[in-house]
Amino acid sequence: MEFLTVILAAAVRSGTPVLYATLGEVMSERAGVMNLGLEGIMLVGAYAGFAVTQATGDPWLGIAASFASGCAITLIHAFLCITLMCNQVVSGLAMVLAGYGLSALMGRTVIGATIKGMASMDFPLLSKIPFIGPVFFQHNAMVYLSYLLIIFLCWFLFRTRPGLNLRAVGENPRAADAMGLPVSAIRYLYCVAGGGLAGVGGGYLSVVYAQMWIEGMTAGRGWIAVALVIFGLWNPARAALGAYLFGGVEALQLRLQAMGSTISTSLLLTLPYIMTIVVLTAVSIKAGKGRLLGAPAALGSPFRREDRE
């Protein structure tokens, strides 16, 4: 039981950076804008968060800088895809390369440097509950904030009028426009905000999780976040389960290495990604049997008011 508790607690910690990026992408894709640039955005957020925390000594300012930098680079993607109506896949891939190059260039002088990040804090009362307490309520404030974000997005998307408007823009922007909704403005808002959350995911890695900057430290987590949106069927709660599943497999392979497992280290490092492929394959098989994945109907499609069907 103790081993399981340790693994699950580590799953929450390891899955949180992917969770932030996944939730951000859920918002963006619900509005009809696909952002494949999460890997680059997370890297920029990771560097910005580390640099500001190192300069100020305040991890919260670092996280705020991660959000702002994520919004800034995503604004470029939004401009290309919404205003100029460029191909969203190509633009997203360009964001990955730009984010990787920019973060590597700016972070070359602080590689390996460390900071005093965000300390863990037990949640009052709940942290004392057997099993549940150590797994969910003995972490840092960013983990607790992610719980609130999951609950908020589930309520916002499915229980509020602005959430309905957001989903309408992603499903049928022409009908939304006929209702008087500002389609482009809504897409801008949620695409940029989603990029900001991806930046926070990167900031969590450098400010809270590792408390240091390493070039390319996201290690593919941005791509995993894109995949987990599909796994979660564009639902924040299901996406959270996927993020924790990924975090659990990652924590397990680290634990096995620490225990001196004879299994190849290279093979262990691939476990989280193999699990992601397996899960996506299962989801695709279900879709092939006629079950709807829940993807927004207008995902990836530019909106032109002048067009007529």
Image (tube, rainbow, N blue to C red):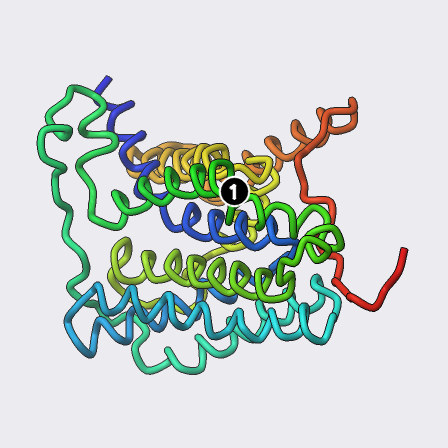
The vertical placement of 42 against 2, above or below, is: below
Q: Describe residue 131's horizontal placement relative to residue 213 as left or right.
A: left
| Screen quadrant of the C terminus | bottom right
Q: Who is closer to the viewer here, 73 or 188?
A: 188
| Screen quadrant of the N terminus | top left
Residue at 45 percent across and 37 percent down: it is 154
Q: Position of residue 239 (x, y in %)?
A: 49, 38
Q: Describe residue 266's horizontal placement relative to residue 253 as left or right.
A: right
Residue furthest toward the right?
A: 309
The vertical placement of 108 against 284, above or below, is: below
Residue neighbourhood size for the residue with mark 1, other residues' Cα within 10 Å, grouped as few (<14), some (14–19), many (≥20): few
Q: Position of residue 82 (x, y in %)?
A: 67, 68
Residue at 58 percent across and 49 percent down: it is 165
Residue hosting label 1 = 270
Q: Position of residue 163 (x, y in %)?
A: 52, 46
Residue at 44 percent across and 75 percent down: it is 103
Residue furthest toward the top?
A: 1
Q: Who is closer to the viewer here, 16 or 250?
A: 16
Q: Quadrant of residue 258?
A: top left
Q: Describe residue 49's horizontal placement relative to residue 153 as left or right.
A: left
Q: Position of residue 210 (x, y in %)?
A: 28, 57
The vertical placement of 242 against 291, above or below, is: below
Q: Secondary structure at mark 1?
A: helix
